[in-house]
Image (cartoon, rainbow, N blue to C red):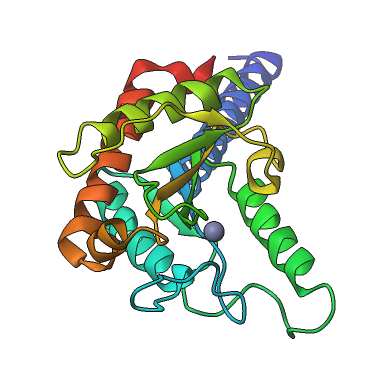
Amino acid sequence: MNFLYKHRIVLGFSCLALAVAVTFAFCFFALSRAAAKPLRLAVVIDAGHGGVDGGVVGTVTGKKESDINLSIARILQREFEEAGFLVVQTRPTEAGLYDLATAGYKRRDMQKRAEIIQKNSPTVMISVHQNFFSDPSRRGAQVFFREDSEPSKTLACLVQTSLNSMPECVKKTAALAGDYFVLNCSDTPSVIVECGFLSNPQDEALLLSEEYQKKIASAIAAGTLTFLSSGANAL
Ligand SMILES: [Zn+2]
């Protein structure tokens, strides 16, 4: 074996060792990246109002909309977590999303909600509210969607259909387009669910019961899961 041949063998082994090392490094990097990436789809749930902004109040009990919203939002969180989703609440407590209730607090509160939605790139966003109207006979759940978003409209129609199918929902309605900040602040398929009217005594009594709150949350989750399984969110 001459010197040149030996040199080539050493060089060949060196190249092979380097290639193996590079392959290992690449695989390790790819695996660690995959492990760091969340595998679960995120859902953002937005409990409307909070803090000094209680929203509307029940005409019979004086209960605040913000508390009912949070209660339903928490049940909804469990529903989605059980279905395997990562859930992010914009308002996880009674507190509003502003530092101090000084001038412009509502704008800061809404801006914070928008930041949370945008940062988490959820597969859907659901904002939970309660309704109020001058005519106390008005009842039922009402879903709103962003007019220029076909996925939002599809999601809203499916959630509305699911809510309308509840036996307690005596006033069936169609989902409506709405020009609201929380719907317009991202391209995520988004809906506002007004679960019922606090200006109607029957709706108010239902909305304050934990049993009905669970039914509402289950209906919202069912409509949303139908939407996601249809693939309409990817259109
Ligand atoms: Zn509200």
Question: Which residue is rendered at x = 20% and y = 66% of the image?
Answer: 210
**In the figure, residue 169 lies in which quadrant?**
top left
Residue furthest right in the image: 103
Question: Which residue is rendered at x = 34% and y = 78% of the image?
Answer: 61
List x then y, in percent, for residue 28: 49, 41
Q: Is residue 70 above or below residue 145?
A: below
Question: Which residue is rendered at x = 30% and y = 41% of the image?
Answer: 221
List x then y, in percent, for residue 183: 63, 40
- The answer to whether residue 123 is seen in the rendering is no
List x then y, in percent, for residue 151: 53, 22
Question: Which residue is rendered at x = 45% and y = 68% of the image?
Answer: 65
Q: Is residue 64 above or below residue 33?
A: below
* Quadrant showing the C terminus: top right
Q: Is residue 143 above or below residue 234?
A: below
- The answer to whether residue 134 is seen in the rendering is yes
**In the figure, residue 225 lies in which quadrant?**
top left
Q: Is residue 211 left or right of residue 150?
A: left
Marks counted in the figure total 0
* Quadrant showing the N terminus: top right
List x then y, in percent, for residue 206: 23, 60
Camera-side residue: 71 or 85? Answer: 71
On the rendering, which quadrant does ligand 1 occupy? bottom right
Q: Is residue 180 left or right of residue 51?
A: right
